[in-house]
Image: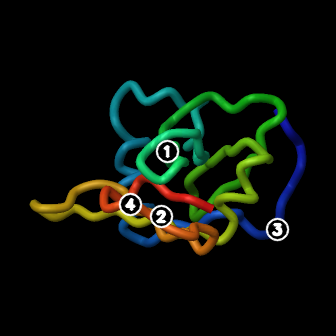
Amino acid sequence: MSTDTILKTPVSFTANAVEELTRLMGEPGFDQQQRLRVGVKGGGCSGMTYVLGFDVPKQEDLQFVFEGVPCCMEAAHQIYLYGMTIDWQGGLNSRGFTFTNPNASSTCGCGTSFAV
């Protein structure tokens, strides 16, 4: 695994997101080798879609910890995600993670697709 240390995390999380991620990592059977993978992939209505899920980090991944949540990201994804804030909405009408990305030139109505 990468031994690079970064001083500023490329993305941040709201208190609600940290609470939900901590809850998920505390579930019985959670694989402690996994980290929260933050990234992008091609697709979606605006051209790129956010990736957010637990995964075992790869050697070339950038790794960081935000308020106790261990994370990993492909280094090349920083250009699209640097400065982004991830939130958790727990309401009845809108439940899930949301993304506020200062690098996005446009987003779609679903909130998980963006263009740069």
Judge from the rendering whether residue 29 lies leftward or rightward of residue 77; answer left or right: left
Q: State the mark number for residue 52.
A: 1
Q: Quadrant of residue 17?
A: bottom left
Does residue 7 sit above or below 57 in this rendering?
below
* Residue at 54% across, 48% down: 48
Q: State the mark number for residue 7.
A: 3
Say which of 69 and 52 sits in front. Answer: 52
As shown in the figure, which amino acid type bears the numbered disc 3? Leu
Image quadrant holding the C terminus, namely: bottom right
| Mark 1 or mark 3, earlier in chain | 3
- CA distance for labels 4 and 1: 17 Å
* Residue at 39% across, 25% down: 29
Judge from the rendering whether residue 55 lies leftward or rightward of residue 77; answer left or right: left
Residue 30 at x, y percent in the picture: 43, 30
- CA distance for labels 4 and 3: 32 Å
Say which of 36 and 48 sits in front. Answer: 48
What secondary structure is found at the residue carrying circle 4?
loop
Q: State the mark number for residue 92.
A: none
Q: Quadrant of residue 67?
A: bottom right
Which residue, given by chain and number where applicable, does mark 2 sit on?
Answer: 86
